[in-house]
Image (spheres, rainbow, N blue to C red):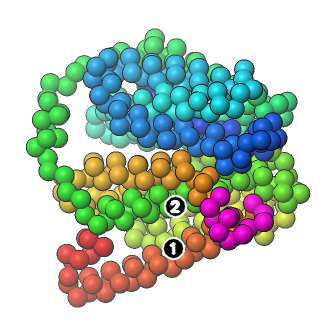
Amino acid sequence: MKKKQIFIFSLLSISFLLTSYGAISAGIPLIQAAFPNQDLSSIELLSTIPSFAVLIFVLLSSFISKKIGSKETVVLGLVLAVVSGIVPYFSNSFSLILISRFTMGIGLGLYNSLAVSLISDFFEGDLRAKLIGYQSAVQGLGSASLTFIAGKLMISGWHNMFLVYFAGIPCLILFLLFVPNPKKDTVNQEEKMEKAKVKINSAMIKYGLLLFVIMSLFMVLTLKLSTVLIEKGYGNVENGATILTLFSATSTISAFFFGFIYKKIKEFSITTSLFLMSLSFVGIFFSKNVVLTAVLVIICGFASVLLVPAIFTKIPTIVPKGSETFATSLMIVGSNVGVFISPYILKFIQYVLHLETQASLFLIVGLIFSLMGIFSLIQIQANQKVIVKGDTNDVKNI
């Protein structure tokens, strides 16, 4: 392998762990059995609390990298993520496991944005765009493969699934050996940011809340799937891990086709995604076998990949000029907060609607997505009428 290829491979490898905190989601029923005195929502928090830490330290990583250097920040983040990821293997303390999961999120958050920005530091033009696409694919590959391996490891005990985070060690070694610290940009980026006036409009708030709601409900898939398979009597945690692996794999593959699909259906992307997710969740509620559930989850994986990029693609067209970066950050905040508090949102829905089974949550979430899809379709038609009348100013603010 040529020196440049080794460098690129090493740089991309750090993204392998970035979305791996959900790899242990399928083992939630096993952890619940080990800690019978813990509320189910608290158990599910083990899967989502890293996203909250990621949210905080994504915002702090720029400051930290300026103080200690980009490479040093990535190394620190990887070390924290790997060590904290493995800690639960050695512990039977729920509090310690919860703290270690949060600390793992700190590590991932430290270098989350650097995984992309370092590509921009070293490359430009078409190659940079190509590698950023690869970076996203590596994230998906990591999520899929580690979920699959964790599913196999948990068969011999729930502690074992945390061993998957040893996968970060080769990534750390490669990065240390073959990726140098980037040269400092001579342009003062902080001055540029100060000159840019950030404005907030209703569209930012609306789409931030939209992502919050969608992600808080969508997490029912990763948090509850294994439980539902067992509850309905046609599957187990290993089946759940395999199906979630298929979900991650579908998401990774579908990401390569987003541009083509979005070009074809454009403003209907979000609506189409919501209806497909609705179909998937309602179908999972009625499903009575593993194969059908797997097919429905694959459809959901395709829909989810179409939805989130469609929102981020739409953002620059609906926010004031110069506010695009802030708007994107707001979307990330909405998404991560939704993921973090998802267990409690789902618990609240169960309490209010007096749902007796976990499977019922899939039906309710599916119906909510269907209503959101209908509302989205009505809004598109309203926008098209405005365009016909020639009043484009209102369209931008909807």
Residue at numbered disc 2: 214
The three-letter code of the residue at mark 2 reads Ile
Front residue of this view, candidates 91 and 333: 91
Dot 1 or dot 2: first in sequence order is: 2
Give the residues in magenta. Answer: 347-358
Secondary element under disc 2, as helix, strand or loop, is helix
Q: Residues within 10 Å of mark 1 (few under 14, many from 20)?
A: some
Residue 349 highlighted magenta (yes or no): yes
The three-letter code of the residue at mark 1 reads Met
* Whole-number angstrom distance, CA of label 1 to CA of label 2: 10 Å
Residue 225 highlighted magenta (yes or no): no
Depicted 343 relative to depicted 12: above or below? below
Side (left or right) of 296 relative to 377:
right
Residue at numbered disc 1: 372
Residue 268 location in percent, x, y?
A: 44, 72
Residue at far front of view: 37
Q: Residues within 10 Å of mark 2 (few under 14, many from 20)?
A: many
Seen at 40% across and 49% down, the residue is 333
Numbered badge on residue 252: none
Residue 117 location in percent, x, y?
A: 34, 33
Seen at 36% across and 30% down, the residue is 61
Indicate the quadrant containing the C terminus: top left, top right, bottom left or bottom right. Answer: bottom left
Task: Tell me if residue 6 can be seen.
Answer: no
Residue at far right of view: 233
Front residue of this view, candidates 166 and 209: 209
Secondary element under disc 1, as helix, strand or loop, is helix
Asked if marks 1 and 2 touch (Cβ < 8 Å), the reply is yes
Residue 72 location in percent, x, y?
A: 38, 17
Depicted 86 relative to depicted 212: above or below? above
Seen at 45% across and 19% down, the residue is 76
